[in-house]
Amino acid sequence: AVVTVAEMAQRLKVKNSSVETYLKRATAKLGVSGRHGLARWMAGD
């Protein structure tokens, strides 16, 4: 299921910009491109 930045922020009780920052930092650290790349990394592909 696709979860929007706004939904993630609401669930984590943080601002949308914080979620966007977390996603950017995670993708940079893992060397993947975008949310799709992050999802593929998490799935082990």
Image: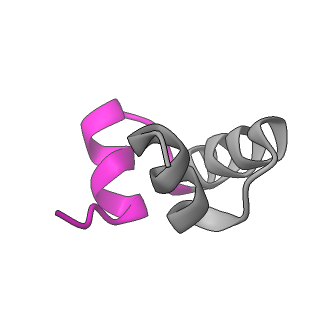
Residue 14 percent across, percent down from the top left: 45, 37
Report the coloring of the rendering. Answer: one colour
Q: Which residue is at a point 51% across and 66% down the rendered structure image?
A: 36
Q: How many marks?
A: 0
Q: Is residue 21 left or right of residue 13?
A: right
Q: Quadrant of residue 32?
A: bottom right
Q: What stretch of residues is rendered in magenta?
A: 1-16
| Image-based side of 19 in relation to 33, left or right | left
Q: Residue at x 75, y 38 (%)?
A: 30
Could you tell me which quadrant the N terminus lies in? bottom left
User: In this view, which residue lies farthest toward the front?
Assistant: 45
- Side (left or right) of 12 relative to 39: left
Instruction: Answer above or below: position of 9 versus 29.
Output: below
> Does the magenta run of residues contain 17?
no
Image point (50%, 47%), residue name: 15
Residue 10 located within the stretch drawn in magenta: yes
Task: Where is residue 39? Give x, y as percent.
Answer: 46, 53
Q: Percent x, y for residue 33?
A: 72, 64
Question: In this rendering, is residue 45 above or below 6?
Answer: above
